[in-house]
Every structure is written in structure tokens, then in C-alpha cells.
Amino acid sequence: MRARGHPPCLCGPAFLTGRSWGLKIMRPDDANVAGNVHGGTILKMIEEAGAIISTRHCNSQNGERCVAALARVERTDFLSPMCIGEVAHVSAEITYTSKHSVEVQVNVMSENILTGTKKLTNKATLWYVPLSLKNVDKVLEVPPVVYSRHEQEEEGRKRYEAQKLERMETKWRNGDIVQPVLNPEPNTVSYSQSSLIHLVGPSDCTLHGFVHGGVTMKLMDEVAGIVAARHCKTNIVTASVDAINFHDKIRKGCVITISGRMTFTSNKSMEIEVLVDADPVVDNSQKRYRAASAFFTYVSLSQEGKSLPVPQLVPETEDEKKRFEEGKGRYLQMKAKRQGRTEPQP
């Protein structure tokens, strides 16, 4: 993907006007067998655009050079499917900076180049932190930006505090492990759960030698898609992704295990929890650790592109029943937000 934007200014604080944008045509290897572009492909494009603009900004003043590392992606809805042959327009803009982080808003439009029709497919908010090129464990300060209105800064500060709190709340799940089960029954959690093992190579990594956030998200979406397809055995597409939290960096040479399990089903949607664990096999001093986690929501589609009912999940263990109720709570909360209410109605 190509990205363009204004060159960095080395003379002082930046205004909230810099943008980065790029174009990419969707090819067969970007899509599933039905021609729908993988959600992971779109997530990877979103992250690349965010990484470019935030790295540019963090190096816009004289000082120690750095690269922006992805820390969190807020909930992302897939508003409209993208198909093979369409052109993706990806634009990114910095919307807030704290002392050590950058908030980036990314929009994705799809264009049918035969008809000229364009439609919005995704709006995403990402958070980055600048890491020193000299020391990957050193977080640098972010150059300040100048806001056109005082309210912009206050609203951004509220979003920053909210995401910081939510990141802390996700750490309690870091001990969860997806265990295989022999001869599971259909429609159970064990029946569709899936894992992918990947050796991190140079092409997956930044200049620092740790994995691009977009690479991780693409692998997470692949695993979640396998879980969804196993459960309903139809064409499936990504409907939304809850906040993706990156708990720790994944270095080159690590073996990562991406595990997915069904947590909740409504009449026409499936929620899948995806966990990413990193095993630094070339470094005996460090143990296996949780690197990222998120919830993906999928829907089942007919050949005509209409949503289909999905088989209802059958939770068996107490933990599975607990996760099902938690997923139901998230589903009802989001449904209420879409209907313009702040709380779900009984």
C-alpha cells in the first residue's frame, strides 16, 4: 500500500491537519472463496496507515529517532463488504496525543472502478506508542499537537483515559489457555476451536525486529474465521472486532500460537475470542507470554449475500457458560447502542 501526506515539520508543534492516505486494489488472494475480502486484510491496511502517520509525527522534531508501535485498536465495525477488483482508499489522521501515545483515526472506502461507486467500509481508532530505535524497550515522548478547539483536546483526553482503563481490565484474562478436546460434539465450544502456529520471520517485523500489529491482526482474523466456518459451515464474513489489546511486543524468531474459541451466538452472529501467545524459543531467559487478545464477531451469509441463522452454541463447562453470559452482555450492550439507548432493556 502506498501512503502519501505532508512532509514532517521540524519547527514546532504540529496542527491536526496532517493526513496519510493510500490505494490498494483487492486481488483474489485478499479474499475468501466467495469473493469477500478478508477482514484481516482490511485490518492490516488500517494498521499500516496508522503506523505510517504516527511514526512520521513522532519523528517530526529533532531528537531521538523512533518507530510507532501499535498498542490498541478500538472497536471496529465492518459496515459494508469489500470484493475482489474493488479499490480500497485508506486515509489516516492524528486526532489526539498524550505524553507517550498517539491516537489515529483511519477511514476505509471501497471503490468500484467500473462504475465509480464509493462506499464507507470501516472507521477505526488506533493507539500507538513511540519506541526508540536504539532501545526497543524505551518509550519516547510524543511531540505535542495544536488543537483548533479546546474541546478537541478535552474529548481526546477522555478517550485516552477510557482506553487506558479498559486495557488494564483485560489483563485478568491473560492466564486463559485454549485446550484441545478429543471427539467433541457439534455446536460445542471444543468442536470449532482452532489454533494456528506461526514462526515470526523478518518479513513480519518492523525495523526494531518485532511484529507489525497488522500482521498479528490478520492472523487473528484468519483463526477467528476458521472457528466461525467450522461452527456454521457456510460462507462467513467479519462483522466487527471488539477492542484489540496488544499486551506485549512479539520479537523476530518467536513462535506465536493464535487460538480462537466461540464464546457466544445470537440468532445471526457469532462472537469468537482470539488469544495470541508468544514463545521466545531462542531466548531461554523468557517464558511464554500473552501478547494480544480480542473478540471478533462474524455473520453467516447465503450465496446471495443475505444473513443466515447460525447454529446455537452449546456451552458445556462452567467456564464456557460464564463466557457465554459475558458475550451475551456485550451483544446486548452493543445492540442497545445501535438503537440509540445507553443501556439494554430487559
Image (cartoon, helix red, strand yellow):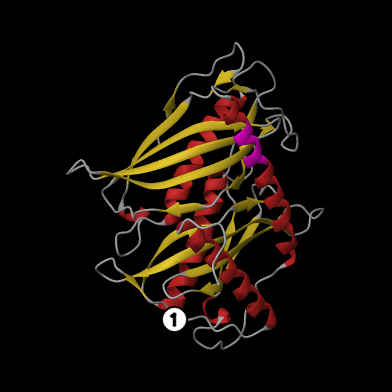
Q: Amino acid at mark 1?
A: Pro
Query: Residue 294 sits in which quadrant?
Result: bottom right
Q: Residue furthest right?
A: 285
Q: Is residue 39 above or below residue 300?
A: above
Residue 237 position, x and y percent, is: 39, 63
Q: Is residue 10 above or below residue 131?
A: above
Taking depth in this image into account, of 29 and 290 the one nearest to the observer is 290
Q: Residues within 10 Å of mark 1 (few under 14, many from 20)?
A: some
Please give the name of the residue rendered at 32% of the width and 64% of the height, measured from the top-left corner: 33
Q: Which residues make up the magenta segment?
A: 154-160
Residue 127 located left or right of residue 132 = left
Residue 302 position, x and y percent, is: 29, 71
Q: Quadrant of the C terminus?
A: bottom right
Which residue corresponds to mark 1?
A: 311
Query: Residue 342 sits in which quadrant?
Result: bottom right
Query: Residue 54 sits in which quadrant?
Result: top right
| Secondary structure type for disc 1 | loop
Residue 155 belongs to magenta span: yes
Residue 299 position, x and y percent, is: 41, 67
Is residue 261 in sight in this rendering? no
| Dominant SS in magenta | helix
Taking depth in this image into account, of 260 and 18 the one nearest to the observer is 18
Please give the name of the residue rendered at 56% of the width and 89% of the height, measured from the top-left corner: 183
Residue 248 position, x and y percent, is: 70, 49
Residue 14 belongs to magenta span: no
Is residue 263 in sight in this rendering? yes
Residue 212 located left or right of residue 174 = left
Q: Residue furthest top?
A: 11
Q: Quadrant of the N terminus?
A: top left
